[in-house]
Image (spheres, rainbow, N blue to C red):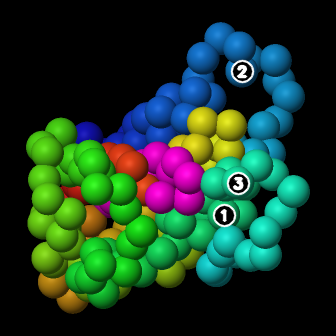
Amino acid sequence: MRPSTLILTLACTCLSLLGCGDEASHDDTPREDAVLGLEGTPPTCGEPDPEPAGACDRACLLGFMQRYLDALVAKDPSKLKVSPTLKYTENGVVRKLGEGLFTTASALVPNARLDFADPVTGNVATQTVVNENGATPVIYSARLKVEDRTITEIEALAVT
């Protein structure tokens, strides 16, 4: 599979996980809360907002993804606020947090990242490139489910 085909497939997968590919979303109205291409660091959760306690808006979700990726390349999952019942899968295999790419990720490739946030469902996803063991590029997609400002699910796909 060509890299461009793989990237398109991963983007469509992220969009479908966020519900952006269902029939209800074909009204040609842009969903500014669902798709965002980022350059630089997204905003993090800031001061309390008027939303209900535990609600996480778009900026908050993007902050969770940034902290997740920071923890990934630091090889330190203890930096994440996760539920005791966290479900973590990588390439379809259930793992313990800290296994898999957490042991080999070394850096995020600059300007190779798309983020998708859906505050209605509490999902945030990314498609990026991560260097593994210092030099090997890995196409990496991840989806986080955030409930009450805690990560309850992590679903990741790493392709070399």
**Helix, strand or loop at mark 3:** loop
> What segment is highlighted magenta in the picture?
139-150
Q: Name the kind of residue labelled 2 in the image.
A: Ser
Q: Name the kind of residue labelled 1 in the image.
A: Cys
Instruction: Indicate yes or no whether the magenta region holds residue 144.
Output: yes
What secondary structure is the magenta-colored segment mainly? Answer: strand
Q: Is residue 125 left or right of residue 103?
A: right
Which quadrant, please, contains the C terminus? bottom left
In terms of sequence position, does the residue under pointer 2 or pointer 3 come before the other?
2
Residue 29 location (% of width, % of height): 85, 28
Q: CA distance from mark 2 to mark 1?
A: 23 Å
Q: Are marks 2 and 3 in contact (CB under 8 Å)?
A: no
Q: Is residue 144 left or right of residue 133?
A: right
Query: With respect to residue 20, does 149 lie above or below?
Result: below
Query: With respect to residue 42, does 54 lie above or below?
Result: above
In terms of sequence position, does the residue under pointer 1 or pointer 3 come before the other?
3
In terms of sequence position, does the residue under pointer 2 or pointer 1 come before the other?
2
Query: With respect to residue 82, does 43 lie above or below?
Result: below
Q: Is residue 36 left or right of residue 148?
A: right
Q: CA distance from mark 2 to mark 3?
A: 28 Å
Name which quarter of the figure residue 39 lies in. Answer: bottom right
**Helix, strand or loop at mark 1:** helix
Residue appearing at x 27%, y 48% in the figure: 85
Residue 42 in view? no
Q: Which residue is mark 1?
A: 60
Residue appearing at x 78%, y 37% in the figure: 31
Name which quarter of the figure residue 44 lies in. Answer: bottom right
Q: Which residue is mark 2?
A: 25
Marker disc for residue 53: 3
